[in-house]
Image (tube, helix red, strand yellow):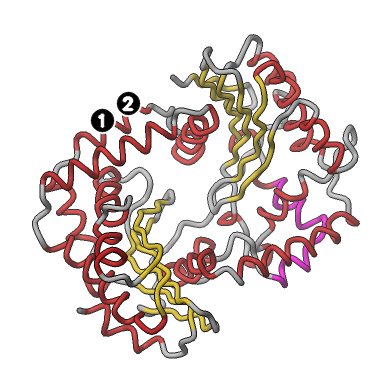
Amino acid sequence: MFQRETLDNGLRVLTADLPYAQSVSVLVMLAAGSRYETEETAGIAHFSEHMFFKGTEQRPSAKEIAGAIDAIGGEFNAFTGKEYTAYYVKCAAEHRDVALDVLVDMLRNARFEEEEIEREKGVIVEEMNMYYDTPRDFIGSVYEHLLWGDQPLGRDIIGNKETVRGATRDTFMGYLDRWYKPSRMVLGVAGRIGDGLLERAQELLGDLPAGETGEPEPTTPHANGRVRVHSKQSEQAHVSLGVHSLPLDHPDRYAIQLLATMLGGGMSSRLFSEVRERRGLAYYVYGLNHSYTDAGTLYSQAGVDIARIDDAVATIAGELRKIATEPLPAEELEKARNFAKGRFVLQLESPQGLMLFGLRKEVLERRLPDPDEILGGLDAVTSDDVARVASELITADRLRLAVIGPFDDASRFEPLLDG
């Protein structure tokens, strides 16, 4: 399904040709995100993403860049994670080369004008205010800071107001010159690709100068207490409760995916059934595993009634302990397996979803993506595998809890983790 070619400068081109499709998705993903920043430049990866849309020599304004994509009926955007950043255009297949040209023009020729930088600082700060005022989103940051502290994985992707306001053109250039190199960059194209793509990629990107970048600092073990509370007056409390888990390429990666699915995937999962349906403690509750290249976390998140937060925390912690200590029914594992496989297959149905899967594999693991490998890995997981991983990872002393709500005393929640 996927083909990979490598240009002379080390830039990889990943393709997935879907001749039946009427559209094409063109993406550039880089192994560079917020964990590649220093404490002083926190937020610069996300800020850079904004600035690439602000104008080039050929298209001097954000309006002209947007107009070029509007003129072909396309969609374009970008997103920044902790370990990667991606830029994309989706459009009718006949306009593939326009999408390529605009995307590469933005990434190679963005002007980063001081006046635009200063103007965009206000936009970023308001985005930050919105983020902080949305506990359902911000709880993830509170939780990851509890797990990893002041290491890059523990910091907000968006940065903080001081570093954003202090950014200059030199701040951007220092970050981009270090990390935006061909060896960390993958061009991904999926859909009805058409002819001559590799030649066009060579024309647009083949002369990017190669360069060594090194790697970000590895994540190290961190002890920061068991509970972290962000005090905020609100009508609902938000909690995130979980444990450190496994990195992306760990041999037990499929077992932990099914463990997370059993806990909190879908409306018949253990957490949804117990926390919402049986006890009425939350409107939303889910569980998942999030893995980075050298770390991970298995956790549940929920928005709960402030007056019943103790019941909610105790119930979630109890479900985590239960799955780690009691036998796992074979039929429940099969349901989780089919759920995980089905959601994965649905993701691959669109050119955009297919290529996002492929790029994450290629960028983060440097492995040619193979959907059959994922499906086979899920099929190979046994109940013993899931039980072993659960018992190794989920113990009372390893549970960590983040809370946003009108509370000041973190210690009041600690006994709830022990059962």
Give the class, few, some or many, for how many residues have Cα within 10 Å of label 2's Cα (few <14, many ≥20): few
Position of 265 with respect to 101 (left or right) is: left
Q: Is residue 247 above or below residue 192?
A: below
Give, as a three-letter code, the residue at label 2.
Answer: Asp
Residue behind mark 1: 376
Q: Can you give x and y, in whole percent of width and height, for residue 126 in the image?
A: 73, 66
What kind of secondary structure does the magenta stretch mostly adopt?
A: helix
Q: Is residue 251 above or below residue 5?
A: below
Q: Secondary structure at mark 1?
A: helix
Q: Considering the numbered disc 2 on the image, is that residue within a helix, a strand or a loop?
A: helix
> Alpha-carbon neighbours of circle 1 within 10 Å: few (<14), some, or many (≥20)?
few
Q: Residue at x 31, y 29 (%)?
A: 373
Residue type pointed to by label 1: Gly
Quadrant of the rendered image containing residue 194 = top right
What x and y, as percent, mark residue 152?
Answer: 54, 62
The spot of residue 46 in percent (x, y) is 66, 54
| Closer-to-camera residue (290/182) | 290
Where in the figure is residue 402, as x and y percent of width and height?
A: 42, 74
Residue 327 belongs to magenta span: no
**Quadrant the N terminus occupies:** top left
Which segment is the magenta one? 161-177
Image mark for residue 372 = 2
Q: Identify the residue at the far top of this view.
A: 195
Q: Are marks 2 and 1 in contact (CB under 8 Å)?
A: yes
At x 29%, y 31%, the residue is 375
Say whether residue 171 is magenta.
Answer: yes
